[in-house]
Image (tube, helix red, strand yellow):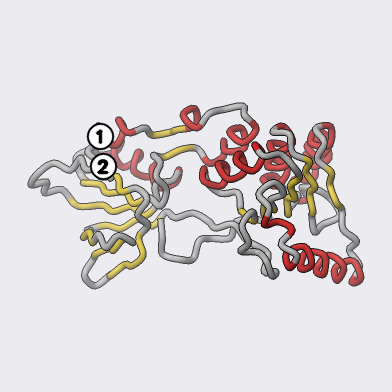
Amino acid sequence: MDHQTLPHDTREHLVVIGNGMAGCRAVEELIARDPTRYRVTIFGAEPHVNYNRIMLSPVLAGEKTFEQIVINDHSWYATNTIDLVTSDPVQAIDRAAKTVTARSGLCVSYDRLLIATGSDPFIIPVPGKDLPGVISFRDMADVDHMLEAAGKGGAAVVIGGGLLGLEAAHGLTLRGMKVTVIHLMPTLMERQSRRGGRVAAEIGTGGARPDHPDRSQHGRDRRRHACRGRAAQGRHADPREPCRHGSGHPPLRRPCA
């Protein structure tokens, strides 16, 4: 936790839930417009300063380091007298009392509250989805898990042939893993169809194998039983053969940073 608040600060207190790109960009804009208006506290669930989530794929692929994707380092928070509370997500908001309470029990009052928690990865609801080795791709912790698994070699399954799924498959392939991509639709990256073929081809040259499923009812039943069978057997519990979900990011619905 970083505390840089000036003593007896009489400015309005702005609390931001979420230390990601959106929340910090909003704070940057507020500071640029009027640097004296708010005293700012930012809560983050991760132990890191603000970094560029879009660049997690190059980190996974070994093209960048975490330090190279940091947007706001510790000096930015200190220079702007921002209290940064890390690894302590907000779990309760009392709108009547105008307070937020974090997991640690820390309770902070506010004059203005900004919720910028982003989205949560969608995990397909099948048995075994909570087994070790089944992970999503949202933050640096997920990248660390994938790098650990890749370091042990073996095979990986990526569920979701969209942009993030293919980037994950590409990065794991570059790390030496044998990757299979399972996608619901008959075309990879169907939402970016003009790019899909080219990106898929690039990944294909790296050794990732796309699995285009049968769209018939028989095909849907076969995929459902296959996923359940693999999960029930604990096939993805081995970290050498992780299952990575790239099935999309619906809005985050739980009250955390």
Marks 2, 1: nearer the viewer: 2
Mark 1 is surrounded, within 10 Å at the Cα level, by few (under 14), some (14 to 19) or many (20 or more) other residues, namely some
Q: Residue at image x 85%, y 68%?
A: 220
Q: Residue at image x 50%, y 32%?
A: 66
Spot occupied by residue 2 in the image (x, y as percentages of width and height)? 26, 42
Q: Amino acid at mark 1?
A: Ala
Residue 2's disc is 2
Residue farthest along the left direction in this orientation: 8
Residue linked to disc 1? 78
- Which element type, helix, strand or loop, lies under badge 1? helix
Quadrant in the picture for the N terminus: top left
> Tag 1 or tag 2, which sits nearer the N-term?
2
Spot occupied by residue 231 in the image (x, y as percentages of width and height)? 73, 64
CA separation in Å, label 2 and label 1: 8 Å
Spot occupied by residue 6 in the image (x, y as percentages of width and height)? 13, 41
Image position of 42 (left or right of 167)? left
Quadrant in the picture for the C terminus: bottom left
